[in-house]
Each structure stands twice: as C-alpha cells, then as structure tokens.
C-alpha cells in the first residue's frame, strides 16, 4: 500500500443488497481473523474519495485492523443516481449497512470526515447496534431537529456556510466541472483567513474569475491529477449531497429519530482550530447528546486533516482505539472491542 500509487491498494466493486454498485478498498491485516481483528469503515466527504484516507489505511492495517474505504454514492466508480433524493442520509446509511452485510461484518468502527462525518453520525442513529465506536473529523455531530431550516436560513445564521447555496444550485454542476482543476485548488487550499470562498457568492466569483491566479494547495500535483481524473466523471452526484436537507429532515421526522447517540458508544471528535466548519458553538452543542464524548483540537490545522495532519490523525485514532480497552492489555483489540462494547 503506497499512498502515492492508488493502484497498490486492494480494490473491489460489488453490487449491494440496496441495488447500488459500490467501489471500495478492502485491506486486511496479516493472518486476518474476523473474530480477532476489528474493522474500520472510513467514510469520506466532499469533494473526496476513498483516496482521502491513503495515508491512514496502511498504518491502521499494520496495527491489526481490517480497513474498508468506499467511494461514496456519486463518486469514483460507485453508482451515480441523478435524483438528489437518492442521496438522503437514511439511504446512504442503508448502503453502509448493506456493505457490512456483504462482507459478513456484524459491527465496525466508523470514522468519517466532512460529509462522511455527518453520515457516520447518522449511521450511529439509524443502526446503533452496528458500531463498536465512532470517530468524526472536522464536522461536529448535529442532532435531528423537529424544525426544518431551509439552506437559506442556515446560511443566514452561519454566513461561513454560504458556499453551500452555490453547491445546491443546479448551475454549479457544469460550472464546477468546466473549471474542475481550479475548483480543486480552491477547496483543497491550505488553512488561511484569506481563503475567501466561504461567504455567499464568493466561491462562484473565484471559480469563474478570469484570468485565474495560481493558488496553493495541501495536495501535490499528482494528487490533484488523481482527484481530477475521478471527479471529471461528473459532479452532479457529489453536489447532490447539498440538495438533500428536506429529504433528510422528513425521513428523520417520520421515523422519530432521536437526538442522542447510544449511551455506551465510545466517541471521538477531531478538529482543526483553523477550520471554519468546526465552530465552538456547534461543538459545544454536540456534547449534550453524546455520553462518552471526547475531542481533540489540532492547533492551526484546517479542514483536510487526513493530509495536513496525516501522522497525527493516524496516531491519535489508533491510540484512542487501543486505549478504549487498555484494561485488558493481553487481549487482541478486536476481541476486546467485541467483548466490552
């Protein structure tokens, strides 16, 4: 497993019981035994791929975990339905449960970033008995609400989320695709108070500006090229995630989905202090709904933690998982998780 060579990972493509085709990386540790080795399911966000976890997969496998990293719906070689309703979190979570079923995995540790963080947080509500532990990166847990807030209202209350109005607009599909390399440089920029694309109208102005000014990125050129090759297959799927707020709300309200995570579920939130998406107010609110809440703030880090702080993320999560069961040091991690949680 070489992070600079995507082809060096073990790739699989399968049809799930939900009827959707999913591409995912499936890496097993040496001497893999499903009863002894835990499974980590890594869920990426926007605009990312399984590839976003390239620096973590190998080290976590070497420490005894099986690692599953899918291209989420609409991305890479996974199915790309055109209807935004197909991207509701309930349906995404059903896909993830079906992926576990396909692999004959009863329970796993779920780790998510960005939209993936939101998704794994909802997975913990829809399928509470299928998690050993939950780790969320960059985007804090937000509970279901009985009151629907339109995206316009959300942006009025949180102006730094103004870019989401552009993503929700149908015109963004082709405009972003036509300027994909520039878009990737903008979104994968290093943390900076001068990044200037979060407020309403700023992102499209930057994207469509002529001439284009060179922009720094947390990615290397070959990494940007890989993202470009995969996302150039179409942006309507990834952007559909920003068009699901009413579908998500109605599903959760109809089901009566509660706000609290399972009481005994170990929980870790990791965030960068220079990331505008992780506000202290939302982080503080999340603590009310999570009994075993823990968090780690990475000073000066931005949104793309798996790249900006790749070694820290790898070590923090691995050490945290092992620390959950340190009271039984002579037992393999998978057995300890299965027996204790």
Image: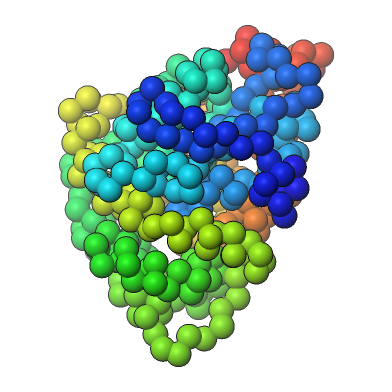
Seen at 27% across and 48% down, the residue is 82
Q: Nearer the viewer, residue 108 or 312?
A: 108
* Position of residue 44 measured from the top left corner of the image (x, y, whole percent): 51, 45
Q: Is residue 196 left or right of residue 250?
A: right
Quadrant of the drawing holding the C terminus:
top right
Q: Nearer the viewer, residue 305 or 142?
A: 305
* Residue that protrudes farthest toward the bottom in the picture: 211
Question: Up-down: is 194 above or below 255?
Answer: below
Q: Is residue 77 left or right of residue 161?
A: right
Seen at 59% across and 50% down, the residue is 52
> Is residue 314 in sight in this rendering?
no
Q: Nearer the viewer, residue 236 or 290?
A: 236
Name which quarter of the figure residue 202 lies in: bottom left
* Position of residue 302 measured from the top left corner of the image (x, y, whole percent): 57, 61
Q: Nearer the viewer, residue 38 or 298?
A: 38
* Position of residue 315 measured from the top left corner of the image (x, y, whole percent): 73, 41
Name which quarter of the figure residue 108 lies in: top right
* Position of residue 167 measured from the top left corner of the image (x, y, whole percent): 32, 61
Seen at 35% across and 51% down, the residue is 237
């Amino acid at each position: 497993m070489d992070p600079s060579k995507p082809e060096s990972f073990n790739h699989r493509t399968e049809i799930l019981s939900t009827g959707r085709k999913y591409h995912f990386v499936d890496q097993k540790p040496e001497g893999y035994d499903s009863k002894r080795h835990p499974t980590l399911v890594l869920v990426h966000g926007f605009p990312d791929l399984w590839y976003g976890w390239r620096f973590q997969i190998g080290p976590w496998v070497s420490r005894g975990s099986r690692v599953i990293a899918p291209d989420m719906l609409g991305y890479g070689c996974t199915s790309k339905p055109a209807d935004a309703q197909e991207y509701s979190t309930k349906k995404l979570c059903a896909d993830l449960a079906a992926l576990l079923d396909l692999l004959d995995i009863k329970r796993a540790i779920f780790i998510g970033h960005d939209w993936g963080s939101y998704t794994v947080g909802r997975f913990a509500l829809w399928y509470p008995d299928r998690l050993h532990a939950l780790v969320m990166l960059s985007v804090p847990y937000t509970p279901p609400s009985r009151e629907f807030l339109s995206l316009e209202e959300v942006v009025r209350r949180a102006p730094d989320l103004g870019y989401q109005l552009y993503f929700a607009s149908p015109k963004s599909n082709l405009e972003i695709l036509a300027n994909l390399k520039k878009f990737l440089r903008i979104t994968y920029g290093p943390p900076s108070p001068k990044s200037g694309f979060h407020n309403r109208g700023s992102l499209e102005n930057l994207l469509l500006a002529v001439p284009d000014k060179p922009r720094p990125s947390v990615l290397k050129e070959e990494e940007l090229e890989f993202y470009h090759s995969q996302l150039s297959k179409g942006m309507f799927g990834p952007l559909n995630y920003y068009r699901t707020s009413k579908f998500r709300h109605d599903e959760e309200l109809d089901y009566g989905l509660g706000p609290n995570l399972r009481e005994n579920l170990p929980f870790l939130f990791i965030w960068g202090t220079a990331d505008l998406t992780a506000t202290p107010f939302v982080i503080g609110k999340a603590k009310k709904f999570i009994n075993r809440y823990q968090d780690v703030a990475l000073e000066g880090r931005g949104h793309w933690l798996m790249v900006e702080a790749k070694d820290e993320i790898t070590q923090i999560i691995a050490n945290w998982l092992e620390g959950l069961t340190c009271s039984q040091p002579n037992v393999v991690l998978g057995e300890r998780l299965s027996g204790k949680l």
